[in-house]
Image (cartoon, grey):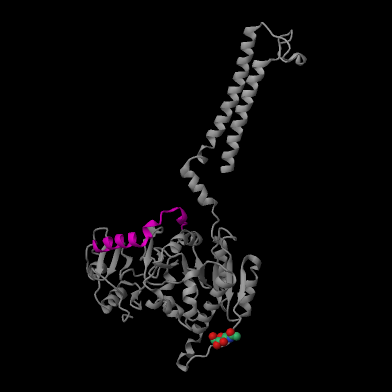
Amino acid sequence: MFRKKGSLILCSMFVFITWNAILVLLLRGRPAPGPSGVPGQEKGEVGQRPTNDVVGDVLRMADVFEAELELQKKILIQIKSHQSLWDPSNRNKQKVVAAPEPVIPILVIACNRVTVRRCLDKLLQHRPSAELYPIIVSQDCGHAETAEVIRSYGDKVIHLKQPNLSDVAVRPEHKKFQGYYKISRHYHWALNQVFKTLSHSSVVIVEDDLEVAPDFFEYFRSLLPLLKSDPSLWCVSAWNDNGRDGYVDPGKADVLYRTDFFPGLGWMLLGEVWEELEPKWPASFWDDWMRQPEQRRDRACIRPEVSRTLTFGRQGVSLGQFYDKYLRYIKLNAEFVPFTKLDLSYLKEETYRNNFEKEVYSAPVVTYEDVKQGQLKRPGPFRLQYSSKDSFKMLAKNLGIMDDLKSGVPRTGYRGVVSFMSRGRRIYLAPPPGWMKYDRTWS
Ligand SMILES: *[C@@H]1O[C@H](CO)[C@@H](O)[C@H](O)[C@H]1NC(C)=O
């Protein structure tokens, strides 16, 4: 745009000089009128003969003036139409657009499920740009059929194969957890590929049984600047552990939260955090390891009100029962929220914490019976208090939200508080005021 501005200035200068040149010509020696009174017919006589036709001269000069004014007017209109480029507030916007957009690779963790096709189809369907979101499928397990499915996508995806297919030596009582050891080894290898071999600076990790929402890419892109700038955050997740139909507010698909619980299931990680985790990456159960205070170090993740991923797989290493009870009912967001155009500054740590505490602890306290029997007449929100591990578990189970705790942190919890909808009312399942820290013996 500076080039455009420059060319406009040049253009104006050119007109100005031309105008002066015309004036000089007119004053020094104008073309004399011919016998017919039509000017310029006797070019050979230019500057040779004075004239007495003063009125005619003035009229001709007026004509030239008029044409010149017309030209000036046209240029002014043109300048006016480009005025938005001169406005300093727009200039900043233009600069932001001009900065190169960061590339966010999507790492798909695959093994032996041919249904990875559903995951890839959805990613490709909603992906707004192949350049900005390269899809890297990392395959473990050496499963030929799955490899064939991935290969069928040709150069739309990058197909990596984890080379070490040997069994992991585990102690006898962990024999049944062999699968978890292999997953941990695979993650370790695949993340090294993304950050070390391919030199990316961020990644969104998706497992082969996840389906993504239409605004999945938009969601992560909008939160990358916040994740990079805020050291109290260490991940962005697309998942709400209590995101079942009836437990979320579908009218609040644009609302995001901080959570102390690492949700996984479609999540963004930065290279710096990988550098920190990689040297001590665990042999198994990497997700619960991430949830330990030694790794989390009081950092939070961002999660949405309505999930941007849905898990459709039920075989594999995780328990089918768990899937049937909770995961299969998670509501996938359907409408596109233009997150990159929204103001997300409310998620900054101090702002968020202050507003959150005010909101939760100014909400009236209600009993479990009030909530369960639908006796809450006002619109809410309401606060339901728990004071021990057992009371948390009892309330959570009876209200239909996740009742497990990892290293003392409840799923979706922020400073001990779990926020969810029940019978159309916002409920905060919260510890007493003055909460200080999690008790890792609560599990
Ligand atoms: C393959 O993985 C096993 C278990 O993680 C490990 O002990 C072994 O060293 C690995 N082999 C190679 C060649 O990296």
Q: Is residue 365 left or right of residue 1?
A: left
Query: Can residue 144 be seen in the rendering of this structure?
Result: yes
Query: Can residue 337 be seen in the rendering of this structure?
Result: no
Q: Which residue lies furthest to the bottom in this view?
A: 172
- Give above or below for 5 relative to 68: below
Q: Is residue 91 left or right of residue 363?
A: right
How would you classify the magenta stretch by its main secondary structure? helix
At a point 63% along the width and 65% down the height, the residue shown is 156
Q: Is residue 41 magenta-colored?
A: no
Report x, y in % for residue 439: 30, 78
User: Residue 126 is drawn in which quadrant?
Assistant: bottom right
- Number of numbered discs visible in the structure rendering: 0
Q: Nearer the viewer, residue 53 or 140?
A: 53
At a point 33% along the width and 61% down the height, the residue shown is 350
Report x, y in % for residue 360: 27, 63
- Give above or below for 232 relative to 96: below
Q: Residue furthest top?
A: 52
Report x, y in % for residue 50: 69, 9
User: Residue 25 is drawn in which quadrant?
Assistant: top right
- Give above or below for 284 relative to 264: below
Q: Nearer the viewer, residue 60 or 131?
A: 60
Report x, y in % for residue 355: 30, 59
Q: Is residue 32 left or right of residue 382?
A: right
- Give above or below for 92 relative to 406: above
User: Residue 259 is drawn in which quadrant?
Assistant: bottom left
Q: Which of 14 and 363 is in front in this view?
A: 14
Assign the N terminus to one quadrant of the image.
Answer: top right
The magenta region covers 335-362
Assign the C terminus to one quadrant of the image.
Answer: bottom left
Q: Quadrant of ligand 1?
A: bottom right
Q: Is residue 344 magenta-colored?
A: yes
